[in-house]
Amino acid sequence: MVAYTFLLYFLFDFSLSIAVSDSVIHNLPLAGLGLAFWYVVQYLSPKDEGGLTSVVVNLTAAVLIAVGLMSYLSYSLLGSMFIRDTGYGQFLTETLPWRILIGALLMAVIVMIYYLLKYNQNLRQKEEEEIQLQSLLKQSELDMLKFQINPHFIFNSLNSISSLTLTEPAKAREMVIKLSGFLRSSLGKDNNELQTIKEELDRMELYLDIEKVRFGERLKVLNEFDAKCEHMTVPNMILQPLYENAIKYGVYEQLDGMVIETKCHCNSGDLHISVINGYDCKAIPQKGKGIGLKNVRNRLELIYGIPDLVTIEKDKEKFTVNLVIPQVADRV
């Protein structure tokens, strides 16, 4: 409106009252019309029936009709206000088509800006929804991996309890209590995804105590733990598949029994864990699907976004699984 007033006053030499009146009466309704088209844009989408062509045709018709009507009304009002000024009246008549054309172009620009804003808004909304879906998918994968406890462990434990009820009822009762405590702590609804290594080792002690009831003196456990690491965090139940793997390929294949060693130390701000078990390289290995180690690898990569946090070393007598656990600021 300021530019319009400037042109009428300085370029066409009309009086200030005419220039201001023309500018306000002609442009103010167009401004209101431009705002009204925001609501039209919300209900007209290229995805609707008819597609882009239908939207363009409908909007073009709406813009031309609305601008033409507004321009004619402002033309009539200005003509009646300055009816005595024949020069201005002739100017109004000559410029009416141009007023309609310029007004329509302005509305077209405004509509295109609205669609750009709407597209940007939809794009951001889709990005947020995608992030939420990725987060839900990641959490679902983590939950699936976390609760993927080998059912053979539960079945074997129950069979051992069944046998002990006849021979050693006290041990059977002790094993039931330990199995219950282990399952409650591992499958509890209020488990944090991350916990301290001390909490994890305490939980694994329950697991190994249950296995000791089955294997007796054949299974021995040795922990080497750096006290400086006790507040460092690890994913919940990350060690259970490693112990299960060690028992499956160690105790079962060695008649003389086996020692499972767990070593924890800190290095460069990360927690390093090694689970070591003896094994007979000449023995025929049991068939397995490798789910345990794959489970650990997948969980660590999902949580920390870093591959290759699990490495394996083996020689003629020992099998070692090494974990590197990055430390994060917040526990989730």
Image: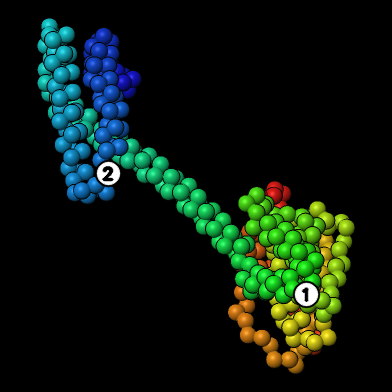
* Mark-to-mark CA distance, 2 and 1: 77 Å
Looking at the image, is mark 2 or mark 1 nearer the viewer? Answer: 1
- Residues 38 and 24: in front is 38
Whether residue 300 is visible: yes
- Residues 124 and 20: in front is 124
Q: Residue at x 19, y 49 (%)?
A: 50
What's the residue type where badge 1 is placed? Thr
Please tell me whether mark 1 sits on a helix, a strand or a loop.
helix
Please tell me whether mark 2 sits on a helix, a strand or a loop.
loop
Where 284 falls versus 156 (above or below)? below
Q: Residue furthest top?
A: 84
Image quadrant in which the N terminus is located:
top left
Where 45 falls versus 107 (above or below)? below
Whether residue 244 is visible: no
Where residue 128 appears, as percent x and y from the top left, is 48, 47
Where residue 45 appears, as percent x and y from the top left, is 27, 44
Q: Residues within 10 Å of mark 1 (few under 14, many from 20)?
A: few
Q: Residue at x 82, y 76 (%)?
A: 216
